[in-house]
Image (cartoon, grey):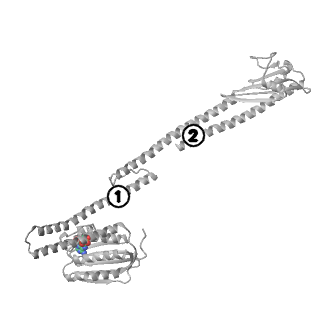
């Protein structure tokens, strides 16, 4: 609407201004000629010194107003009686002609006047006739010009016509464009509103390459992401509650058994209570893992320089008792000064989860090898074991939350299926990558590559 208003205003000015200017121009030249003619007529007549019908006609013919048949010339004497009139149809000769212009001329003034109406320019002029310093009469000229007037009229009406056509065009184009634009915005709004109702993953139509299509494309990407994270959230919540329910159900059964039997031998009660203790430990571990997952999801940890070799040694110390139980040997081959930019606790968690798995899913008397080496740009950590291995089809799934290859074994070993999910999230948070290679029955090798300190891409 604003643009339409501006265009209207500009067109109106364009209409009025040239018409004004050209009319004023025509008026000025008209007035000049009319005044010149009146003065010339009057002075020629006074030169002759006689003011009769005869002398006036001679002057009229001598001046030769040419083809301008529409020019009317009236000469009056000092009593306003018409002496000469070139009109044949409305001849005034001998009659009293009382015109304002003639009165002014008789007072000694030249007068001139111009007017335009409906395609006709009328102009008149009067001048006094002087003989020996005395005003003896006046001459009056009157002209109707429909030729120039017609030109002016044509020009004005053409301007108006063009303006009207332009206006109509502008209105139609504006309406079409704004309808197109608002329709696309409305479509986008509709999809956004439906998404607010919880329908994730909806797409808005993207057509064209303008900002609006860019907006739609961005919206679609956002919608996909929302859908994915919503699905992940749902799966996580249902998996987590399922995992929490199992140990709770065991506790319930054990408690019910103790309460239900009147004369349970004390050793049995003790055994049951020990069972409750174990389930409680599992619950504790599980909630700790869950907390770790959500902590990694939620915020960016504090980053500092971490010596990965030192972390591996600490983890080894803590895992030794577990490994010794199964007579598993842990061998380290560590380069010095493998420094990465990361959070120390998270690096500990990564190394611990990987090495604990290597011990947990190992055979008695098995081996765990940890390699750590740094090149200019990267620090590589490899945890390899001679354990049970992972079936090829499941290698890709071990990073999923709560995914366990051998549920019974994992549970027995106190696993929750969250360990590798936590590792992957943490590794990626520090710009690293992780890869699993495994042969069923022979062993597993997990390789983690971190950017070396100072090499991490910001982002
Ligand atoms: P869990 O708490 O069960 O150990 P993880 O996320 O750490 O969960 O591991 C997921 C699954 O991947 C485990 O249940 C196990 O079946 C398998 N897995 C992990 N590491 C190894 C390994 N070193 N050797 C064999 N299987 C492994």
Q: Is residue 93 above or below residue 450?
A: above
Label number found at residue 226: 1
Residue in the picture at 38% in, 50% down:
205
Label number found at residue 342: none
Label number found at residue 8: 2
**x and y percentages locating residue 458 in the rendered image:** 43, 70
**x and y percentages locating residue 278 in the rendered image:** 19, 73
**x and y percentages locating residue 363 in the rendered image:** 19, 79
CA separation in Å, label 1 and label 2: 47 Å
Q: Quadrant of residue 82?
A: top right
- Give whichever of discs 1 and 2 has the lower sequence position: 2
316 left or right of 51 in image: left
Q: Of residues 239 and 166, which is closer to you in this image? A: 239
> How busy is the neighbourhood of tag 2: few (under 14 within 10 Å), some, or many (20 plus)?
some
290 left or right of 111 in image: left
Q: Is residue 240 above or below residue 217?
A: below
Question: In the picture, which quadrant includes the C terminus?
Answer: bottom left
> How busy is the neighbourhood of tag 1: few (under 14 within 10 Å), some, or many (20 plus)?
some
Q: Using the rendered image of the protein, determine whether residue 263 is visible from the camera's viewpoint.
A: yes
Secondary structure, mark 2, is helix
Q: Using the rendered image of the protein, determine whether residue 438 is visible from the camera's viewpoint.
A: no
């Amino acid at each position: 609407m604003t643009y339409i208003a501006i265009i209207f205003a500009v067109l109106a000015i364009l209409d009025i201004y040239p018409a004004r200017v050209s009319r004023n121009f025509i008026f000025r030249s008209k007035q000049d000629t009319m005044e010149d003619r009146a003065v010339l007529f009057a002075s020629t007549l006074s030169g002759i010194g006689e003011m009769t019908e005869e002398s006036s006609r001679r002057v009229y013919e001598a001046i030769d107003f040419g083809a301008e048949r529409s020019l009317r010339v009236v000469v009056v004497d000092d009593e306003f009686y018409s002496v000469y009139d070139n009109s044949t149809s409305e001849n005034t000769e001998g009659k009293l002609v009382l015109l304002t212009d003639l009165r002014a001329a008789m007072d000694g003034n030249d007068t001139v006047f111009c007017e335009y109406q409906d395609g006709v320019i009328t102009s008149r002029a009067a001048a006094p006739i002087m003989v020996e310093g005395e005003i003896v009469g006046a001459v009056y000229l009157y002209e109707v010009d429909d030729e120039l007037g017609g030109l002016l009229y044509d020009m004005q009406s053409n301007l108006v016509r063009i303006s009207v056509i332009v206006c109509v065009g502008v209105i139609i184009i504006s309406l079409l464009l704004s309808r197109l634009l608002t329709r696309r915005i409305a479509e986008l709004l509709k999809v956004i509103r439906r998404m607010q109702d919880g329908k994730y993953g909806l797409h808005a139509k993207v057509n064209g390459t303008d900002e609006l299509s860019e907006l739609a494309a961005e919206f679609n990407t956002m919608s996909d992401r929302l859908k994915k994270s919503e699905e992940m959230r749902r799966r996580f919540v249902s998996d987590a509650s399922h995992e929490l329910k199992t140990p709770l159900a065991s506790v319930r059964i054990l408690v019910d058994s103790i309460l239900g039997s009147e004369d349970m031998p004390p050793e049995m009660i003790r055994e049951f209570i020990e069972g409750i203790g174990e389930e409680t430990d599992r619950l504790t571990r599980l909630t700790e893992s869950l907390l770790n997952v959500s902590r990694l999801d939620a915020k960016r940890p504090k980053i500092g320089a971490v010596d990965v070799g030192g972390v591996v040694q600490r983890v080894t110390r803590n895992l030794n008792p577990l490994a010794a139980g199964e007579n598993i040997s842990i061998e380290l081959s560590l380069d010095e000064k493998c420094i990465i930019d990361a959070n120390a606790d998270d690096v500990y968690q990564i190394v611990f989860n990987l090495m604990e798995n290597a011990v947990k899913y190992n055979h008695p008397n098995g081996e765990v090898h940890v390699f750590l080496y740094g090149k200019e740009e990267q620090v590589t950590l490899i945890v390899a074991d001679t354990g049970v291995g992972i079936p090829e089809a499941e290698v890709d799934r071990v990073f999923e939350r709560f995914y366990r290859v051998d549920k019974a074994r994992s549970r027995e070993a106190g696993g929750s299926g969250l360990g590798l999910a936590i590792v992957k999230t943490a590794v990626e948070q520090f710009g690293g990558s992780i890869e699993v290679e495994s042969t069923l029955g022979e062993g597993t090798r997990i390789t983690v590559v971190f950017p070396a300190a100072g090499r991490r891409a910001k982002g």
